[in-house]
Image: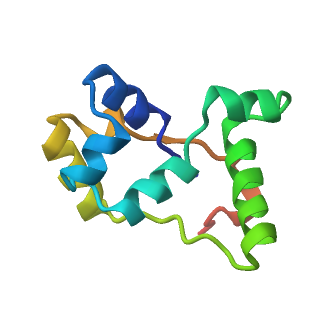
Amino acid sequence: MIIYNKLFKLLEKRGITSYNIKVENLISQQTFQKMKMCSVTDKDKENYPDKSDAEIIQAKLNQYKADKGKSFEYGVSTTTIEEICQLLQCQPKDIIEWKIDLQPELAYHK
């Protein structure tokens, strides 16, 4: 799972608020919402104290599905990642983390 905690820390460090993003159309609102859904705030950690970041995000996605009756499409394209990196003059590793519980049964074996 791609987690965007680093992106929001970088935005805060640079003084870029969600208001700036919306008014100046720095990132589309749909993309921004996807990234917010796939990040973990201090409040999220309080609500899910015994869960990892990936588990918290999955719980948020499940809650969205329960509330709205549909899945949340949370994928962000590599083109969008590239555009954000250009905007912030950074590398993808500066804005995303990949955390997953590897499942050996899904590995390719030749």
Check the image and report above or below for 59 versus 64.
Answer: above
Counting the numbered discs, the total is: 0
Task: Work out whether residue 79 can be spotted.
Answer: yes
Question: Residue 21: x, y in percent?
Answer: 28, 47
Check the image and report above or below for 40 versus 73.
Answer: above
Query: Residue farthest to the bottom?
Result: 70
Which sits in the foreground, 16 or 76? 16
Residue drawn at (53%, 64%), measured in percent from left and top?
74
Q: Which colour scheme appears in the figure? A: rainbow
Task: Tell me the quarter of the picture where residue 50 sits.
Answer: top right
Query: Residue farthest to the right?
Result: 50
Q: Which quadrant holds the C terminus?
A: bottom right
Residue 84 in the figure: left or right of residue 56: left
Question: Residue 91: x, y in percent?
Answer: 24, 37
Check the image and report above or below for 91 versus 34.
Answer: above
Residue drawn at (27%, 55%), measured in percent from left and top?
27
Residue drawn at (72%, 74%), measured in percent from left and top?
68
Task: Tell me the quarter of the picture where residue 11 sits.
Answer: top left
Residue drawn at (33%, 35%), measured in percent from left and top?
17
Task: Work out whether residue 103 can be spotted.
Answer: no
Residue 97 in the figure: left or right of residue 77: right
